[in-house]
């Protein structure tokens, strides 16, 4: 099977994400020694570099010990493989970009699970905490679940690979709307 030229663009995006992701993680771990330090304030209280070894998936969900680690690793690699195959069938630039970003992010995090036993996260945009009075009030009316993890506005720590996956998913959704709209416009022109 010959790989179409446009698919190579997806693979290049994936490779760029993997390289950038792994370089930033190496800098965090071995340059800044964030694992030992824990947290470095950058733009308090909005942005900090905070070391987290996430053994699950997004938001720390699905933490399942060693079995979970390897299942998530295999899942990430299989998904990347399926996206790589999809790229050989793709014909739109936005779709190719989305597939490359998601592939690169999935493989970047899979590398972490193999090397470290979990994903190295460090970009912390938790922001200022909700005032305690607001937390208490919201909890008193039964809506405490709306304020996650100790009152942080965005308590999740992430990395370059996570960002690439998120951006890739948004682009994938945008591509589906754009291509669906183009198909409807094309069908309307054929009818007239």
Image: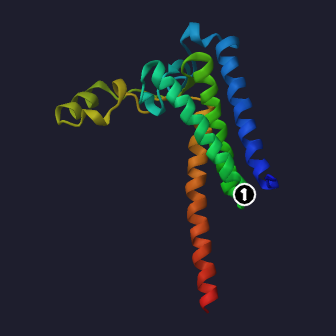
Pick the residue in front: 32 or 14.
Answer: 14
Colour convention: rainbow
Picture residue at 65% right of the left edge, 17% below the top:
28
Picture residue at 55% right of the left edge, 56% below the top:
173
Picture residue at 52% right of the left edge, 19% below the top:
53
State which quarter of the image contains the C terminus: bottom right
Q: Position of residue 99 (x, y in %)?
A: 65, 48
Q: Is residue 155 visible?
A: no
For the residue labelled by badge 1, is the local secondary structure a helix, a strand or a loop?
A: helix
Relative to 126, 1 lies left or right: right
Pick the residue in front: 64 or 126.
Answer: 64
Q: Position of residue 82 (x, y in %)?
A: 62, 46
Image quadrant in which you'd find residue 43: top right
Q: Position of residue 11 (x, y in %)?
A: 75, 43
Within 10 Å of disc 1 (Cα), the crowding (few <14, some 14-19, many 20+) is some
Image quadrant in which you'd find residue 115: top right
In the figure, 165 relative to 158: above or below? below
Relative to 175, 130 lies left or right: left
**Residue at label 1?**
93
């Amino acid at each position: 099977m010959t790989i179409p030229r446009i698919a190579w663009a997806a693979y290049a995006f994936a490779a760029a994400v993997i390289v950038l992701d792994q370089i930033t993680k190496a800098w965090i771990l071995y340059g800044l020694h964030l694992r030992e330090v824990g947290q470095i304030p950058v733009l308090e209280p909005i942005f900090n570099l905070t070391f987290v070894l996430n053994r699950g998936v997004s938001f720390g969900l699905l933490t399942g010990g060693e079995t979970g680690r390897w299942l998530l690793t295999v899942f990430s690699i299989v998904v990347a493989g399926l996206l790589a195959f999809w790229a050989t069938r793709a014909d739109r630039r936005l779709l190719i970009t989305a597939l490359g970003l998601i592939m690169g992010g999935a493989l970047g995090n899979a590398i972490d699970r193999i090397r470290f036993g979990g994903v190295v996260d460090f970009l912390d945009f938790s922001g200022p905490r909700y005032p305690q009075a607001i937390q208490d009030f919201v909890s008193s009316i039964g809506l405490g679940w709306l304020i996650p993890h100790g009152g942080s506005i965005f308590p999740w720590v992430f990395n370059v690979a996570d960002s690439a996956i998120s951006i890739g998913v948004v682009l994938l959704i945008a591509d589906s709307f754009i291509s669906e709209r183009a198909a409807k416009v094309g069908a309307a022109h054929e009818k007239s």
